[in-house]
Image (cartoon, rainbow, N blue to C red):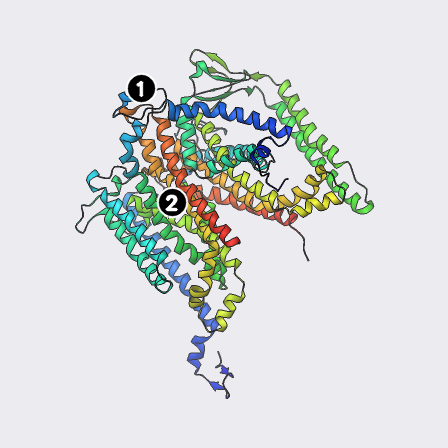
Amino acid sequence: MRTGVPTSWRERLFGTPVTAVVTLLLAAAIAWIATPIIRWALIDATWNGQTRNDCTGTGACWVFVKARFGQFMYGFYPIEERWRPNLAGLAFLLGGGAVVFAPQRLRLRLGLAALVILPLLGVWLLGGGYGLRAIETREWGGLMLTVFISIYASLIAIPLGILLALGRQSELKVIRLIAVLFIEFWRGVPIIAVIFLASLLLPLIMPTGIGVDRLARAVIGLGFCIAAYMAEAVRGGLQALPKGQREAATALGLTYWKATSFIILPQALRISLPAITNEFIALVKNTTLVLVVSILDLLGIAQASLADPNWVGMNMEAYVFSGGIYWLICFALSRWSRSLETKRGR
Amino acid sequence: MTARTFSLLSEPVIVSKALAFINDKRVRDWFYQAALLIGLAALLIYFIRNASQNMVQAGIASGFDFLWRTSGIEVPFVITNYTQSDNILSLFWAGVANTLLVTVIALVLSTLLGFLIGIARLSSIWLVQAMAGAYVEFVRNIPLLFFVLFWYFGVIAALPAPRESLSVFGVAFLNNRGLTIPLPDAGANFRYAFIAIAVSCLLHWLFLRWARRRKEATGRDAPVLRIGLLLLVLVPVLALAWATLATRWDIPVLRGFNYRGGFVVIPEFVALLAALVTYTAGFIAEIVRGGIQSVPHGQIEASAALGLRPGPTLRLVTIPQALRVMTPPMTNQYLNVLKNSSFGAAIAYPDVVSLFMGSALNNTGQAIEIIAMTLAVYLVIGLAVSAFMNWYNARIALVTR
């Protein structure tokens, strides 16, 4: 295996006769495959128009995506109320930014406040009530729902995952056993089955008469499942810390919880942040599974739009657009996670 | 419990018995654990009570009697002997068999494709490396469900009708109703072939043991590679070739609008398999690359300095060390394939989740029993595989002092 990277492009592509032949063959194959795709997506595509009748080109008809853009983003959320999810998103961005850029001494308090206020604010803005028009979760959908499920499921998964990871490292046998059983159970079963399970069992185990919202069931199910994976991510960070850290904290007279929250977790979480981000990417990808309980996130809306009699035969356009958005989100997150890793490695 | 004395101060101070008791670490630990257990048990009892009340109200039966009722559910794709008039337990096994079928085939194919792409990522030819990298980055950042739906509604649905099927060497035919493959008329010859293969694997294992003992005793090498090729490649290939040629095949023929004869692999299976293989290969490629890169370059230089050729270096130095790094993540990935096979439920591939947790649950309403049985399938297989891989991992692990 060569480790040195050849410097010039000519050497990279045509360094030896074998390289040159393979490069040329592969380039021909790429051109052969990519040309029809590019023709379909760009050159022969239709860009302007309003209805299916405007799709006259032989390529893709992006008019379909344009006409449905609102639905891809918000699902069936009432058009005149779409400022609410926008505002909620902005609030999360600003709140998150404020915590990250706050001075060190305020950060913990601000972070905890944001953790309590923002989720409540988000649910209120989206769901309504208390002065806002109530909008049932049935009407939520699209990219907005993908983001909502990802954030709220990780609000369950990350704290629970940290507790489970601590439990797994605990010296108390019963606590360790409970944590291990919980983690291995949720890691051992398919997420699709967990979503079915949550939607069937949660209403069953609640007192008669108390319903659990359909979307809330899916979020809770996903949250529990991802918590087990998060726990393993956090465990990596905990195990990377030298034992002396806790011993020193105990020697200074800190109690278990003080040592954990001021000495152990700040260091462990920093180490496991790339792993936590990777689990978050997996969560974003797994939100698509709510489709099986008829909740329409971005992929669900794309899938549902195929059944529209006014837009027959738009399968590829719908898939390319929705797949592209997922790819952008996950690719950006994975790049960020990798940059965190290299930063730590230096 | 006796009162304790603290001799940190100049004179020992006797603290009161009660205070000493609640400050004792063992007592406290015991108390916390008991409190947690009691809390969890109380929560569990509360849930169970609610559930039984709700079930009584909704008129849902409990217990496992429903398993012996006639199922009446038609399954479009079975590899067991299940028919509609069998009981629900047979339906369960039909689902488990379908889950295992797609999992095993996806495992083999995605391992092959993953190794190919992983090695391509380390190629010295830049364009090969870049293409493999692009594939990995593309596949890993898109949800698996997207691939499942894409293959099913985007690709398979767009295939030509049976009349214009894509022919695979004139014996198998791919169209929008699935893949029609030839089926042997009788399985006897294949049974003999599989027995022959099993015997030859056993012989190979015995031979390896004998070769290792002899090497330890006398230091002489046995022709391990040649015998291995003979027993593990030549014998199976010959046996299967003989069985294929000696058996009469039912080759599908186009009659009217569809194919007659052979075995129809439903489009759901083809789409799920294609999605699982393309997706998982991206993850396996990364594991393979990581494993090979984890072998320090000094190891390869050292073996070259000892006079080993590139071939033996790869076989004796690089691969054994790379395998050691690759085993745990590969186990995880294999278990993921098992769990991910349940994505078939989204396109109604009749696996255990969609047959049992879907159809059977709709018919009987016995959610708790059915969910428990379905999850048990995954947990039992997962535990068995983990146990085996732990054993294997311990065998190949680096023995250090």
Residue B286 visible, this orientation: yes
Question: x and y percent of residue B70 in the render?
Answer: 40, 32
Provide the secondary structure element on which disc 1 rests.
loop
Q: Judge left or right: residue B345 versus residue B278.
A: left
Provide the secondary structure element on which disc 2 rests.
helix
Q: Judge left or right: residue A156 versus residue B164.
A: left
Q: Quadrant of residue B148?
A: top left
Kind of residue sitting beneath label 2:
Ile
Please name the residue that numbered disc 1 is placed on: A56
Residue B112 visible, this orientation: no
Question: x and y percent of residue A340 in the render?
Answer: 47, 51
Kind of residue sitting beneath label 1:
Thr
Question: x and y percent of residue B243 in the render?
Answer: 64, 22
Q: How many marks?
A: 2
Instruction: Looking at this view, name the residue that lies furthest to the bottom.
Output: B11
The residue closer to the viewer here, B287 or B225, is B287
Residue at figure coordinates x 18%, y 52% from the top left: A130
Task: Tell me the distance, in whole angstroms, between the alpha carbons under discs 1 and 2.
Answer: 53 Å
Q: Nearer the viewer, mark 1 or mark 2?
A: 1
The residue closer to the viewer here, A13 or B337, is A13
Q: Quadrant of residue A198?
A: top left
Q: Quadrant of residue B38?
A: bottom left
Instruction: Looking at this view, name the residue that lies furthest to the right.
Output: B218
Using the image, determine if residue B68 lies above or below residue B216.
above
Please name the residue that numbered disc 2 is placed on: B368
Instruction: Looking at this view, name the residue that lies furthest to the left.
Output: A131
Using the image, determine if residue A4 lies above or below residue A163.
above
